Structure formats: C-alpha cells, structure tokens
Amino acid sequence: MAKYRHRLPQLDGGVFLTDAGIETTLIFHDGQELPHFAAFHLLRDAEGTEALRRYFTRHARIARDNGMGFILESATWRSSPDWGEKLGYSPAQLDDVNRRAIGLMHALREEFETARSPMVISGCIGPRGDGYDPGRVMSAEEAQDYHSRQARIFAETEADLVTAITMTNVPEAIGITRAAQAEGMPVVISFTVETDGNLPTGQSLKEAIGAVDEATGKGPAYYMINCAHPSHFEGVLESEAWIQRLKGLRCNASRLSHAELDEAEELDDGDPVALGADYRALRARFPHINVLGGCCGTDHRHIEQICHACKAAA
C-alpha cells in the first residue's frame, strides 16, 4: 500500500532531495551499458539490480544523514511501450519491470527512512521520444493513451506519485497528467528547458505551466525544471503567481546546450560546489522551491553540495 499518496509531505515544506543524473552516472562513473539510455534494463538480472541499489543508496544516505526528505525516483524513465519494444520487452515484461523498479524503491525506503527523513516513492515516466527534442508532438489524447498503462501499473504498487521527467512539450504533459488522474495518482510535471529558459518547442515555462493547469484543472501537484543549468533559466523566473507552481529543480552540472551535450564525447560534470551555490541562490529568491536534485552530468557529489549549501542557508 502506498504510504504518502494522499498527502505528499514535500507539499508541506522542508527540503527534499532527489537523486542525480542516473544514466550519466551509471554509464560514465559505474561503467554500465545502458542501451537507449534505459536504466530499467539493469533490473533484468541480480548484478544490474545491485548496481541500481548502490546508486540509490549513495543518494538516500545523504538525505538521511542530513535530516532531509528524499524522493525515490524509480529507474523507469525509458520503460514505456516504444522504448521497451526496442529493447525486446513484451508488454507483460514491461509491466513486470515497472513493478520491480517500484519494489526496489520500497525496499530502500524500508531501509533508510527515518522520522526526520520521509522518503516518497515516485514512479518515473519519460517522454515517448527524446528528452531534448520534441520531434513529432502527440495530441494530449494520444499521449494519455500511450502513457496510461505505465501509470496504471504504478497505481497498483507502493508508488506515492507519478513524475514525468524531461517533458519537452505541453500536449504530452497534459496527456500524462490525465493518465495519472484517471488512476487516482498525484502527478508532477518536470519540463526540459533550453539555454533561453524556454521549452524545446519555444514555449515559455510560464505559458507551459498555465496551459497544463488550464487543461487539467491544475492537475499536477507541482512542476519542476530539469536538464538545464541554473544559468539557463534563472532569468525567466519571476515573482509572479505562476512561480508558486514551480517547486522542484533537477539541473545539469554543465552549462552546455543540449546540442553541445549530444555531441560531447566526454562527460561534463561541472563544479559541484558552484552548483550547490546556484541552488542556494535560487532558494533565496524562491524559498518555496524545495525539491532539489540533479540531471545530466551530476552525481552524488553534486547532491551532497546542494544539500550542504541549502542546509547552511536554512
């Protein structure tokens, strides 16, 4: 049974950490092979499952040891139908791996959660296409149909919410929100933004949040920004009503654009201390932003610096 599905503790304040850039960490630091950037593929055997357990353990310990909450984000960003088919998974096998991914998060919560460090289990949903390029944009109805099965499986597990990460366009965000709503699941939408702070479609973050809220009756519990360095979007954040809907950041370590990152042959892991200072500065402007993690190029060192910087400023 889900523990926090009907009352997400991150909505009540306090800092909640997340993990970092799982795929880049597993590939560049841990030496794992991830075809199609699919971390869930590691769940196919005991060795891969243990690699995921080690990865999440490093991050959960940082939250526990510092008395902060933690979002256990399942390694299921790629475990949707199109990506599963590319990796040879049948629909039933994909359902099973989604369940096992949440099961791993539940086991980690049982091991690491304390009264000072509540740990929320999130079923991660990724885009049907690329996390940088919207490609062919589905209608909201198509997106709901495509993502509904994964949302349904998460609703049958201990997952407390669904989080859609690296959303590049509004219709897909609307579709995922409606798919989660149909299953009675809280949902969070995290948008990818470019170096100008806008979505890859060119739409502003303000407009995107407003459009999803309008189409879903303010369905998302909150919104996040992912896959961009703070310098890419800090200028578009305004002290207006819409900013209160933004509660989370999962930033890149690198200042490079998505196009530059795609062409890079080596990992740009930036400066963990500087990234922590960037988060502290953003929290000083917008203290309601309390879900803090990483994206491409970040690892547990960045999360640790984000944690320490924001803890010192509290």
Image (tube, rainbow, N blue to C red):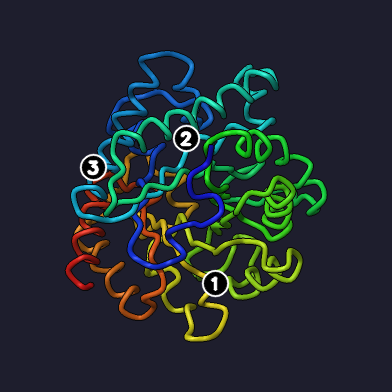
Task: Say if 189 sits above or below 266 in the image.
Answer: below
**Looking at the image, is mark 2 or mark 3 nearer the viewer?**
3
Q: Is residue 182 left or right of residue 97?
A: right
Residue 39 placement (x, y as % from top left): 46, 30
Q: CA distance from mark 3 to mark 1?
A: 28 Å
Q: Amino acid at mark 3?
A: Arg
What x and y, as percent, mark residue 259? Answer: 49, 52
198 displayed left or right of 301: right
Disc 3: CA contacts within 10 A as few (<14), some (14-19) or many (>=20) = some
Q: Label 2: which residue? A: 75
Disc 2 packing (10 Å; few <14; some 14–19; many ≥20):
many
Point out which mark residue 166 bears: none
Left or right side of 256 for 173: right
Q: Please give the residue where the numbered disc 1 appears in the rendered image.
A: 245
Question: For residue 66, what is the image quadrant?
Answer: bottom left
The answer for how far apart the CA atoms under marks 2 and 1 are is 25 Å
Identify the residue at image location x=57%, y=78%.
Answer: 242
Question: Which x, y percent locates residue 308?
Answer: 19, 60
> Relative to residue 236, is residue 289 depicted above or below?
above
Q: Residue at x 75, y 47 (%)?
A: 143
- Which residue lies under the disc numbered 3? 61
Q: How many marks?
A: 3
Is mark 3 in CB contact (under 8 Å) with mark 1? Answer: no
- Residue drawn 27% across the image and 52% down it: 303
Q: Quadrant of the C terminus?
A: bottom left
**Residue 37 percent location from the top left of the image:** 49, 33
Q: Callout 3: helix, strand or loop?
A: helix
